[in-house]
Image (cartoon, coloured by chain):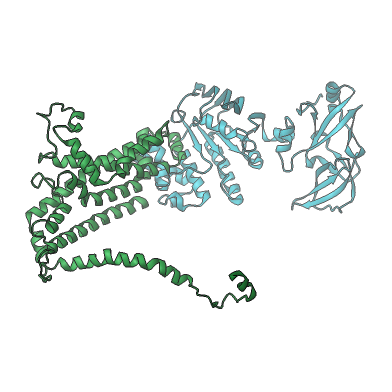
């Protein structure tokens, strides 16, 4: 029917026909706006609202409107020894964890670089930890770390539960327990990026290096490393940011304990916001301090990255 | 400097020969060109000499030392790749310094030798740039500099000019030839371009289908091709090849032409064929002498002006429409369809066995 009509009165292309038509432009708007509205509601608005709250003494459970108190929150936080302790703990955690992930991930990538029988399946198996939910990983490892029936102590050689260390309950070991799990979970991510970097290095560079009489170590240092460096740095950047935000894994494993031994900065934000007095305003202020630090660290990385790319 | 010896060197991929067993001795300071169409095994041969490719059997000797199974870095050879294979993340200076630093030369020595080689190739102004910012010709100069800086015993070059445009190719050809003369370094050069091979080589190794067809000086492979493949492949256009029946000092060619065989060749043909038999007559376009009569008759099919000379396409009016290329001076003019008589220069005629396609030898 419609077809017949169209044939009977062929309208010029430029003139809009009688039927309802949507221009390409309004169609694209129609697709974009629902997402945009959602983003504004759950991202942009909270971003600015929390910035406002960070200058107030607002508490989510107190039944009173936010009251402007200026820089008091920031002043308190930045002059608190506890907070600086949590920052340095987070920094130490990020440094060790990301460092180990880089070395192990790059090492795995070098091992898996040459294809062998079953290398595909091995790669996939190695990638599995990365695909799991951090909370699930945290709970599983909590079981494995258990000194009475956990398998971890047995595997590392402590077969007697009476003398074996209780990883998650020991203030000196709890941080290392989280680092071990984080490295287990995220080294594959570094490996994945390094593998794609390695496979992009053309063979002829190594042929030229062999002709140029470069030793294996010289080739690694002068060809492999600089060629992979951009991707390796991106992996390190991602992991550093993530390590600074470490939360779910810590909550799943230790909840910040024992005592304050694993009170990472994100856990502290959570404690401020949702435990005890529900200090929403102060938690927002702390979140902004972390944001500024992460932006600063990322900037340093990105500059290094650009430098590596340009040489 | 070095002599390179290949003894029964072969390369097989599965059951297929990439290079059939070949013998070749490259003298110290010689410029040898491996020439052939793509896939003929010339690059594989070069890579076997370099050690980048393992031989399937046979021996490679460098200065008499057996290096058949030595790693490329133990052979003291430099390799110039077709697509340059420069290190993209290093500057030009670092690229050239790479082989020196890999051997742990001192900083001062590296500085000195890079500066020397940069001056030699006139690339001093490029040293701080990255290879990606350079033109193809400059990239190839860097690749040459990287090969030269180490002062290797021999240079292996795999179509080093293949990635350059025609004009640049000619400039670089002269530069490489000049470098070879200055350095007097043993060089093995792979190309599919027969003009390049003729212009540069002291000797040419013509390869086809994994087999060496002929080894000889440029003049040899041009004037005395060992078989029909070489005759066709060298020269543009290649040698004119006409099949005919020999009997009593005369070869009957297409179109009723009767070519009286020069005396020295007549003896050779008689020795090979007896009184009569099939033979292939070969002659270069410049072996024809047009005008002033001649034993052969043909019709002008086309005449191409090449600037310095005219290339005639002559139809012999035979049953299969056989064509002959003939070179005439640029002053002469020929009309299409004109009948011309021509002769062949007796010293520039070759004869090939019709069965084996191998060239016959003169009997003086």
Task: Give how far across and how far down residue A4 sits, in percent.
Answer: 62, 71
How many numbered tags mark residues here?
Answer: 0
Which color is chain B depicted in?
cyan
* Nearer to me, A57 or B267: A57
* Nearer to me, B237 or B146: B237
Task: Give how far across and how far down residue A262 sits, in percent.
Answer: 13, 46
Q: Residue at x 21, y 52 (%)?
A: A245
Picture quarter with the N terminus of chain A: bottom right
Residue B104 showing in the rendered view: no
Going by the picture, which residue comes out furthest to the front? A1
Task: Give how far across and how far down residue B341 sits, in percent.
Answer: 90, 44
Which quarter of the picture shows residue A28?
bottom left
Task: Give how far across and how far down residue B192 sits, in percent.
Answer: 63, 39
With B254 as the anchor, is B18 left or right in this view?
A: left
Q: Which chain is green?
A: A
Up-down relation of residue B250 to residue A297 (above or below)? above
With A192 as the anchor, is B85 left or right in this view?
A: right
Which quarter of the picture shows residue B348?
top right
Q: Residue at x 53, y 29 (%)?
A: B48
* Nearer to me, A218 or A282: A282
Q: Residue at x 9, y 41 (%)?
A: A171
Q: Residue at x 13, y 32 (%)?
A: A148
* Nearer to me, B38 or A42: A42
Which quarter of the picture shows residue A293?
bottom left
Residue A198 showing in the rendered view: yes
């Amino acid at each position: 029917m419609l077809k017949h009509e169209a044939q009977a009165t062929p309208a010029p292309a430029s003139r809009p026909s009688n039927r309802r038509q949507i221009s390409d432009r309004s169609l694209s708007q129609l697709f974009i706006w629902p997402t945009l509205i959602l983003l504004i509601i759950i991202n942009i608005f909270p971003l600015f609202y929390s910035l406002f709250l960070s200058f107030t003494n607002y508490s989510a459970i107190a039944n009173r409107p936010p009251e402007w108190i200026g820089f008091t929150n920031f002043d308190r936080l930045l002059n608190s020894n506890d907070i600086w302790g949590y920052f340095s703990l987070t920094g130490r955690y990020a440094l060790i964890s990301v460092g180990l992930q880089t070395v192990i991930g790059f090492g795995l990538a070098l091992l898996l670089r040459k294809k062998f029988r079953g290398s595909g399946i091995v790669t996939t198996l190695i990638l599995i930890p990365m695909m799991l939910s951090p909370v699930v990983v945290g709970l599983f490892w909590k079981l494995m770390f258990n000194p009475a029936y956990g398998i971890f102590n047995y595997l590392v050689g402590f077969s007697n539960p009476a003398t074996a260390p209780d990883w998650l309950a020991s203030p000196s070991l709890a941080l290392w327990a989280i680092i071990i799990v984080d490295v287990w979970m995220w080294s594959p991510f570094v490996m994945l990026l390094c593998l794609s970097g390695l496979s992009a290095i053309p063979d002829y560079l190594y042929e030229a290096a062999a002709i140029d009489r470069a030793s294996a170590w010289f080739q690694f240092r002068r060809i492999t490393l600089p060629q992979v460096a951009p991707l390796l740095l991106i992996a390190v950047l991602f992991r550093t940011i993530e390590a600074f935000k470490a939360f779910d894994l810590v909550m799943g494993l230790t909840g910040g304990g024992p005592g304050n031994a694993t009170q990472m900065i994100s856990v502290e934000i959570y404690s401020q916001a949702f435990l005890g007095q529900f200090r929403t305003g102060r938690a927002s202020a702390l979140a902004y301090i972390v944001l500024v630090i992460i932006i600063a660290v990322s900037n340093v990385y990105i500059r290094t990255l650009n430098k590596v790319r340009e040489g | 400097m070095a002599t390179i010896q290949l003894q029964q060197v072969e390369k097989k991929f599965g059951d297929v020969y990439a290079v059939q067993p070949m013998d070749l001795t490259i003298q110290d300071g010689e410029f040898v060109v491996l020439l052939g169409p793509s896939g003929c095994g010339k690059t594989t041969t070069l890579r076997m000499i370099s050690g980048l490719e393992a031989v399937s059997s046979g021996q490679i000797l460098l200065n008499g030392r057996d290096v058949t199974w030595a790693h490329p870095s133990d052979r003291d050879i430099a390799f110039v790749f077709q697509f340059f294979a420069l290190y993209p993340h290093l500057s030009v200076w670092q690229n050239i310094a790479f082989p020196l630093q890999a051997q742990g030369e001192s900083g001062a020595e590296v500085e000195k030798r890079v500066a020397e080689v940069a001056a030699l190739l006139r690339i001093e102004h490029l040293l701080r740039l990255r290879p990606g910012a350079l033109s193809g010709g400059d990239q190839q100069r860097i690749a040459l500099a990287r090969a030269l800086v180490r002062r290797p015993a021999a240079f292996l070059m795999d179509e080093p000019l293949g990635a350059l445009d025609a004009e640049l190719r000619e400039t670089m050809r002269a530069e490489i030839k000049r470098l070879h003369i200055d350095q007097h370094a043993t060089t093995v050069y792979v190309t599919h371009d027969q003009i390049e091979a003729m212009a540069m080589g002291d000797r040419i190794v013509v390869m086809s289908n994994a087999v060496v067809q002929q080894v000889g000086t440029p003049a040899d492979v041009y004037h005395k091709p060992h078989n029909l493949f070489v005759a066709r492949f060298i020269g543009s256009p290649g040698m004119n090849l006409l099949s005919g029946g020999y009997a009593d000092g005369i070869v009957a060619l297409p179109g009723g032409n009767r070519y009286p065989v020069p005396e020295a060749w007549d003896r050779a043909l008689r020795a090979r064929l007896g009184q009569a038999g099939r033979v292939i007559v070969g002659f270069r376009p410049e072996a024809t002498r047009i005008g002033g009569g001649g034993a052969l008759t043909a019709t002008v099919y086309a005449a191409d002006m090449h600037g310095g000379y005219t290339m005639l396409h002559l139809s012999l009016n035979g049953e299969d429409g056989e064509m002959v290329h003939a070179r005439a001076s640029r002053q002469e003019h020929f009309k299409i369809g004109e009948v011309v008589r021509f002769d062949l220069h007796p010293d520039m005629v070759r004869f090939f066995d019709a069965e084996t396609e191998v060239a016959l030898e003169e009997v003086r």
